[in-house]
Amino acid sequence: DARDVVASEYSWLRRSGIETGSFDDFLIDFVKGTSNPWGAWGDHIEFWLNSSSARSGRLHLVKFEDLRSDTEGVFMRALEFLDAPSSRELVGMAIENNSLHRMRAKEDSARERGWRERARADIRFINTGSVAGWQEKLKPYQARLIEDRFGDALKRLGYL
C-alpha cells in the first residue's frame, strides 16, 4: 500500500541521513517519483503487474498485509511457487527467528557492533510492523494525494 510505503520510506531515508526535509516535501517527491532511484511507486507496481513474468504466471505477489495475517501460509505458498523444498517446522523456525521482537533485538545488536554507525539511533530500521499504519500517520490530504496519484495501482492491489 503506497500510503504505508511513503511513511516507511521517509523513515528509512531519514534514518540513513539521506532525507532531511519535511514529510510534506518528501511526499511531493514520492508522488513525482523522485524520492528514490527506482521511480514512482505506482509505475513500479504497474511494471511488474503488466510484465511478461506476471502474464506467464512467473510472478508471485506477496503483500505485507497477507504476510502479517498468515505468515506461515504466505511462506509456504512462496516456497511452493519457487518449487523449493519446504517443511512447516523449518518455516515455523524461520518465522520465530524473524519475529518483530527478534528483528529489533538483531537491530540493536548490529548497532552495538557498529553497523551503520552513521544511521540515526533515534529512528529504528525495524519499525512497528503494523498493517495500515498510514491511517494514524497520514493526514487526510496526504492520503488523498497518494490515492489520486496511485489510484489505479492501489485498486489493482485491492487497497481502494
Image: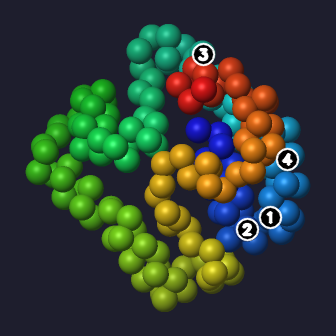
Q: What residue did someone put label 2 on?
A: 14
Please identify the quarter of the rendering in which residue 24 is found.
Answer: bottom right
Q: Nearer the viewer, residue 9 or 87?
A: 9
Helix, strand, or loop for circle 1?
loop
In the picture, measured across the screen, residue 140 lies left or right of residue 160, that is right
Residue at image location 18% in from the left, 53% down from the top: 92
Check the picture and name the quadrant holding the C terminus: top right
Q: Earlier in the sequence, mark 3 or mark 4?
A: 4
In the picture, measured across the screen, residue 121 lies left or right of residue 63, that is right
Q: Nearer the viewer, mark 2 or mark 3?
A: 2
Asked if the residues shown at circle 2 and circle 1 are in contact, with their CB atoms under 8 angstroms apart, the answer is: yes
Please identify the quarter of the rendering in which residue 75 is found.
Answer: top left
Asked if the residues shown at circle 1 and circle 4 are in contact, with their CB atoms under 8 angstroms apart, the answer is: no
Residue 50 image label: 3
Circle 2: residue type: Arg
Helix, strand, or loop for circle 3?
loop
Q: What residue did someone put label 4 on?
A: 29
Q: Earlier in the sequence, mark 2 or mark 1?
A: 2
Q: What residue did someone put label 1 on?
A: 19
Residue at image location 61% in from the left, 49% down from the top: 135
Check the picture and name the quadrant holding the N terminus: top right
In the picture, measured across the screen, residue 40 lies left or right of residue 136, that is right
Asked if the residues shown at circle 3 and circle 4 are in contact, with their CB atoms under 8 angstroms apart, the answer is: no
Asked if the residues shown at circle 1 and circle 3 are in contact, with their CB atoms under 8 angstroms apart, the answer is: no
Residue at image location 48% in from the left, 48% down from the top: 131
Q: Earlier in the sequence, mark 2 or mark 3?
A: 2
Count neighbours of disc 3 (C-alpha within 10 A) and say few if under 14, some if 14 to 19, many if 20 or more.
few
Q: How many marks?
A: 4
Q: For the residues marked 2 and 3, what is the alpha-carbon distance in whole angstroms?
A: 32 Å
Residue at image location 46% in from the left, 81% down from the top: 108
